[in-house]
Image: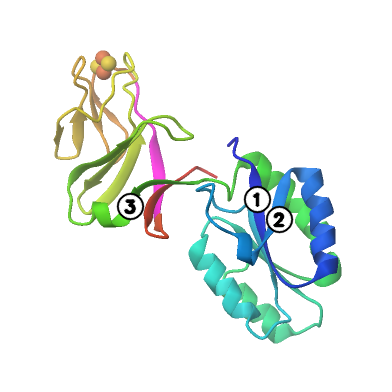
């Protein structure tokens, strides 16, 4: 994805901060301290680095994992502690490392993360409150990083699909939805919004299906990793 990368440093550690700043310059990732981590971009951070030497370090891992399921979460220890190491791993850290190895190990991963877009891709589509109890089309969003997207609720499940017909680029969201199948209002192609599968032509291909998550009060688009 083309969004700028950003990451969170959950630590009060000037040396780590400086080293991560250098790494960030290398790979195009901006590190923000916790008090500046407003979801201003609507995108999840590419990574979160947590100081596990603090008494609440493991709880912080749990909280970041819940808030940003897609982010690469790293805990580091200045003082070796097998118990904390295991607890942090079990609490959702993708990587636990000692302080000296933090930057080299993160460097080995973060370039790949930013190239593939992993951890960057969460785009709010609709407030979760607006979706509750509704069926069928719940939102059509014309501009997202993957183009127009329509969000449906079918069989108590949220489904997000490309809101563009592959036949002649008609918008699908104004089309009728019956039993999870939408009919393109332009020439009548049909697609199952649960799977993206083409049910009837003239379109000769399926439509894209996107992963969504509900977090921070929003139904959000999550790009494929
Ligand atoms: S544009 Fe959808 S069927 Fe032609």
> Residue 168's spot in the image, x, y percent?
32, 13
Q: Is residue 202 visible?
A: no
**In whole angstroms, how far apart are the C-alphas of marks 1 and 2?**
6 Å
Residue 207 among magenta residues: yes
Q: Which residue does the image show at 17% across and 47% down from the upper left?
A: 135
Q: How crowded is mark 3: few (under 14 residues within 10 Å), some or many (20 or more)?
A: some
Residue at disc 1, CB closer than 8 Å to ligand 1: no
Give the labeled residue for mark 1: 6
Are the residues tagged 1 and 2 within 8 Å (C-beta)?
yes
**160 and 85: which is toward the camera:** 160
What residue does disc 3 label? Answer: 127
Mark 3 → mark 2, Cα distance in angstroms = 28 Å
Residue 162 falls left or right of residue 154: right
- In the figure, is residue 104 to the left or right of 41? right
Question: Which residue, given by chain and number where applicable, does mark 2 sit on?
Answer: 31
Q: Is mark 2 on a helix, strand or loop?
A: strand
Quadrant where the image shows the C terminus: top right
Q: Residue at x 35, y 22 (%)?
A: 205
Identify the image quadrant of residue 133.
Answer: bottom left
Q: Which residue is drawn at 71% across and 55% down?
A: 31
Q: What stretch is highlighted in magenta?
A: 205-213
- Residue 150: where, in percent of width, then height? 31, 36
């Amino acid at each position: 994805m083309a969004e700028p990368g950003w990451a969170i440093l959950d630590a009060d550690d000037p040396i780590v901060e400086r080293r991560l700043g250098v790494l960030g310059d290398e790979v195009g990732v901006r590190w923000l301290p916790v008090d500046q981590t407003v979801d201003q971009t609507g995108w999840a951070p590419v990574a979160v680095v947590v100081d596990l030497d603090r008494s609440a370090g493991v709880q912080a891992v749990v909280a970041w994992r819940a808030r940003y399921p897609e982010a690469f979460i790293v805990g580091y220890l200045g003082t070796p502690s097998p118990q904390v190491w295991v607890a942090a791993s079990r609490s959702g850290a993708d990587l636990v490392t000692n302080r000296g190895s933090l930057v080299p190990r993160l460097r080995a991963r973060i370039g790949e993360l930013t190239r593939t877009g992993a951890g960057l891709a969460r785009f709010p589509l609709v407030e979760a409150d607006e979706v509750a109890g509704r069926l069928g089309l719940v939102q059509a969003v014309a501009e997202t990083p993957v183009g127009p997207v329509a969000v449906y609720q079918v069989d108590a499940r949220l489904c997000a699909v490309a809101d563009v017909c592959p036949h002649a680029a008609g918008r699908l969201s104004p089309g009728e939805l019956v039993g999870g199948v939408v009919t393109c209002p332009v020439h009548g192609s049909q697609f199952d919004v649960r799977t993206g599968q083409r049910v009837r032509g003239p379109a000769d291909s399926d439509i894209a299906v996107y992963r969504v998550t509900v977090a921070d009060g929003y139904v959000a688009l999550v790009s494929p990793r």
